[in-house]
Amino acid sequence: MSGLLAEALGAAAGGCALLLIVIIIIVLCLQHRKRTSDSSESGFSDQALPESQEARCLSLEELNFATRNFSNGNLIGQGTFGEVYKGLLQDGTIVAVKRRHSPPSQEFIQEVNYLASLCHWNLVKLLGYCQEDGMQMLVYEYISNGSVSTHLHGNSHALGSRLEFKKRLSIAHGTAKGLSHLHSLTPPAVHMNFKTSNVLVDEDFAPKVADTGIPGMLDRLGVTGLSSRTFNDPFVEPRMKEAMNLNFSIQSDVYSFGVFLLELISGRKAVSDQCIIQWAQSFQESSDISVIADSRMAGGFTSQSMKELLSLTARCVNPTSEQRPSMSSVEAEIQRIREQEISLTAVMAEGTPTVTLGSQLFRTSR
Ligand SMILES: *[C@@H]1O[C@H](CO)[C@@H](O)[C@H](O)[C@H]1NC(C)=O
Ligand SMILES: *[C@@H]1O[C@H](CO)[C@@H](O)[C@H](O)[C@H]1NC(C)=O
Ligand SMILES: CC(=O)N[C@H]1CO[C@H](CO)[C@@H](O)[C@@H]1O
């Protein structure tokens, strides 16, 4: 090879390398900008939406193997759909298997495919199903760190103290995103059974809403008496009734979300709807934050953000359902409060060491 050619090749390679480095820097900067605009402080990326795909049909043999023949040791709970078992598939995936007695049906498969299409980073993912042996089964991804309810009201009082205010805001925000996604679909999907025990968290405290669409599914499969929240007025024509039911359910989800926020703020279990409505009314009149806020947060919040979150909560549990905000505006409001809280506390913590730019730039995404 002549010296000239080698030199030209070297220059070209150098140029390419330089170009590549520039491209990498641009991509990193763009990602950084995107992430700082709406990432949570626990660092999970919201951009990573899982791909929507059809639910897989699993064999009973596989599930027997995964759950050690549905042994009692693997039983982790009892949900709307039925008993829930923890299992380990042969490919290493940890799953939660829900099962109920029922003969196989084609409608079940249609319903499963519908549920699988409700796909979002903040919803527990449906992986597959099985209909064998007089049983219908739903196979979900397993979320490792329990429910928000366990963290707030579990036996160990200490668990809740791990949840500082900003973490609670980040959980509320992710959860609102999940519900808001459901409501944004055409036709809107409704949760119908939203509560703290149905919000699961992973090891980074990223929230995942569980049990999505199950009450509606059971209704359509003809399992009666589960979804009692239907609008029934003999003088309203059926088509109108359908639209009203849908609105009713969407607004009930917002109400339930308000109750969830209240539990998240106070650390206390919502006892009855009546208490909450009374609470919301009394909050409008006088607002003593120190009485309401969970003492385990040890006052680690600004009263401005806390007041605004409480006011949002009060709007969500408005007794007049038409006056409740939409889930998408709830999501936007929590996002705003969260960003405000982050910047307010950053100012407060001035003088303490801050995160260097480099570590932010190269923060690994999940
Ligand atoms: C499950 O049941 C099958 C058949 O009854 C049996 O052969 C197998 O050993 C059982 N597995 C476990 C883990 O109990
Ligand atoms: C349902 O809500 C939408 C949007 O708020 C509204 O336009 C529509 O009139 C409502 N339908 C019924 C039947 O209340
Ligand atoms: C309730 C629960 O499972 N808590 C676990 C959450 O994850 C941390 C590690 O990130 C564990 O230490 C906890 O035991």
Image: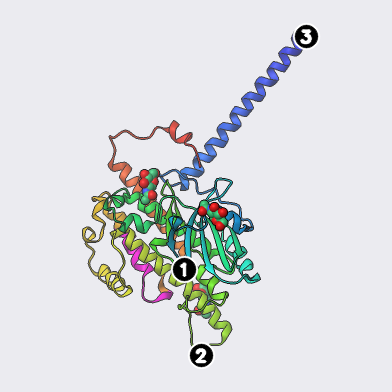
Marked residue nearer the N-terminal end (3 or 2): 3
Magenta residue span:
307-322
The picture quadrant where one finds residue 133 is bottom right
- Amino acid type shown at disc 1: Thr
Residue occupying image coordinates x 28% and y 34%: 351
Magenta span has 220?
Answer: no
Nearest to the eye among marks 3 and 2: give it.
2
Q: CA distance from mark 1 to mark 2?
A: 29 Å
In terms of secondary structure, where does tag 2 sit? loop
Residue ID for mark 2: 234
Mark sitting on residue 2: 3
- Amino acid type shown at disc 2: Pro
Where residue 233 sits in the image (x, y, percent)?
49, 87
Location of the N terminus by quadrant is top right
Q: Main secondary structure of the magenta part?
A: helix
Nearest to the eye among marks 1 and 2: give it.
1
Q: Is residue 243 left or right of residue 54?
A: left
- Amino acid type shown at disc 3: Ser
Residue in front for this viewpoint, 182 or 83: 83
Other residues around mark 2 within 10 Å, as few (<14) / some (14–19) / many (≥20): few
